[in-house]
Image (cartoon, rainbow, N blue to C red):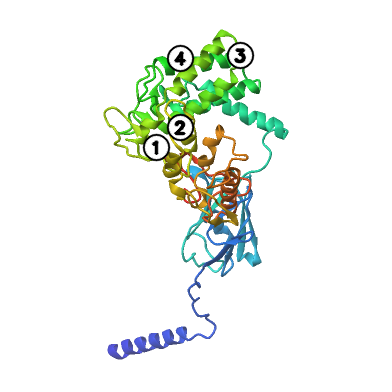
Amino acid sequence: MKKTLLFTIICIGFLANCKKERAPNTPPPAPPPASFVLQRVSTGNQSGTNFSNLPMTPRLQFWFNAPVDKTTAAAAIAFSGDAGAAVNFALAFLQGDSSFTIQPSQPLFGLTAYEISISRLLKSAAGALLTSAATVTLKTGIDSTDKFPRITDDALLTLVQRQTFTYFWDFAHPNSGMARERNTSGDLVTTGGTGFGIMGIVTGIHRGFISRQQGLDRTARIVNFLTTQAPRFKGAFPHWINGNTGAVIPFSANDNGADLVETSLLAMGLITARQYFDGADAAEVALRNSINAIVNGIEWNWFRKGNEQVLYWHWSPDKGWAMNLKIGGWNECLITYVLAAASSNFGISDTVYHKGYARDGAMGNGKTFYNTRLPLGPDFGGPLFLSHYSFMGINPNGLNDQYANYWTQQVAHSTINFEYCKANPRAQQGYSAACWGLTASDIPGGYTASSPANDV
């Protein structure tokens, strides 16, 4: 009897369970959410995840394959700048919530990198998590909005000249008056830079930034230091000098003596001062005599290293010709050969110029870059200082030889540099027709001679 009752209860429970599972009014369980994917990011005419040259208030649009759960957006989206600083932004939903735009609430800084990240906390309206997190990098272009009062072109030229002059005047070494390599260089002064600084003094007088007497006194201090304290090797100066003691500061392990190119840049400045301070008073006469003694004492032909048909860059008493660097063109060293050829005491022949600097014509180029034919030098022209240094003192207008018209060379070099930066083939940040000009400079991490062929 008990067995029959237990069997009956089990059967009734089984039948009841079967009826419960098959109840016609119970809905089936919900399927798992479909995948949720970021399909595209765009701004302006750019699409991708890496944007450059953006305006200061860019508007980026994000497209998804399904509507977004708007309540999850705030926790999932981060907009950051340098060092992770948060950027406030406006978020607007479009396309039935399957797209949204992000725009900074305040203008961004120019020429600065930013990042927008979207984590997997973002969900679709159906509850699906974002399949994979996304990171979008954006770099702003130049901020061309006015930040200073508008001034005329003449006033701008004056301002640029004054600020350039101010570096050489205010940051000159207090003892020697010579130019420091950088404004952080302490007692280290530079020979070629001092040549440029002397030219800056002449310009400062001419533009009324200082008086003629102030400029004369400073130039006389420099020349006196060069005459009485600075070391010379066959009349040539080292690249770097201690502005207090006059001792050589080696530029490198084997470069602790004469640097003929730096000396020529110094001589160019000294000759400029000699021609400018042309007064009959005793101070200006004495200055001219001291400059003549320095310039006329440079033994240019010694640097032919045993009468070779080329000039060498370096020599020192203990290292000799260990640097073994021939001065050949096309580069910034034209002034070295011009001054050497002009020397009345230690001159070189035209053969040394043709075989040494021009390398029997091998300094020529003749190729076309950005629709501009380049007469001389490396492809794309090299850094712009190759055209700056010598022509601080040499006028290229009307200057010709069998290798080039030097005004044409100058224009071609600058034009190619400009067109390269405007085309910006490497998508470098900020390059444009309004921001161009690659040359030697300090950059993050060190120093380099920037050019279209060395664009870092």
Indicate which disc, 3 or 1, sits on the residue closer to the N terminus. 3
Distance from disc 1 to disc 2, alpha carbons, whole Å, reads: 9 Å
Q: Is disc 4 surrounded by few (<14), some (14 to 19) or many (20+) residues within 10 Å? A: some
Distance from disc 2 to disc 3, alpha carbons, whole Å, reads: 27 Å
The N terminus sits in image quarter: bottom left
Outermost residue to the top: 282
Q: Is residue 417 above or below residue 125?
A: above
Q: Is residue 150 visible?
A: no
Residue at 42% of width from left, 28% of height from top? Answer: 346
Secondary structure type for disc 3: loop
- The amino acid pointed to by label 1 is Leu
- The amino acid pointed to by label 3 is Gly
Say whether marks 1 and 2 touch (CB < 8 Å). yes
User: Who is closer to the viewer here, 74 or 206?
Assistant: 206
Mark 4 or mark 3: which is in front? 3
Which residue in the protein does label 1 denote?
Answer: 311
Q: Residue 199 sits in which quadrant?
A: top right
Indicate which disc, 1 or 2, sits on the residue closer to the N terminus. 1
Distance from disc 4 to disc 3, alpha carbons, whole Å, reads: 19 Å
- The amino acid pointed to by label 4 is Asn
Mark 4 or mark 1: which is in front? 1
Distance from disc 2 to disc 4, alpha carbons, whole Å, reads: 23 Å
Q: Position of residue 59 (x, y in %)?
A: 63, 55
Which residue in the protein does label 3 denote?
Answer: 279
Distance from disc 4 to disc 1, alpha carbons, whole Å, reads: 28 Å
Distance from disc 3 to disc 1, alpha carbons, whole Å, reads: 36 Å
Which residue in the protein does label 2 denote?
Answer: 340
Report the disc number at residue 224.
Answer: 4
Q: Is disc 3 surrounded by few (<14), some (14 to 19) or many (20+) residues within 10 Å? A: few
Q: Position of residue 451 (x, y in %)?
A: 50, 47
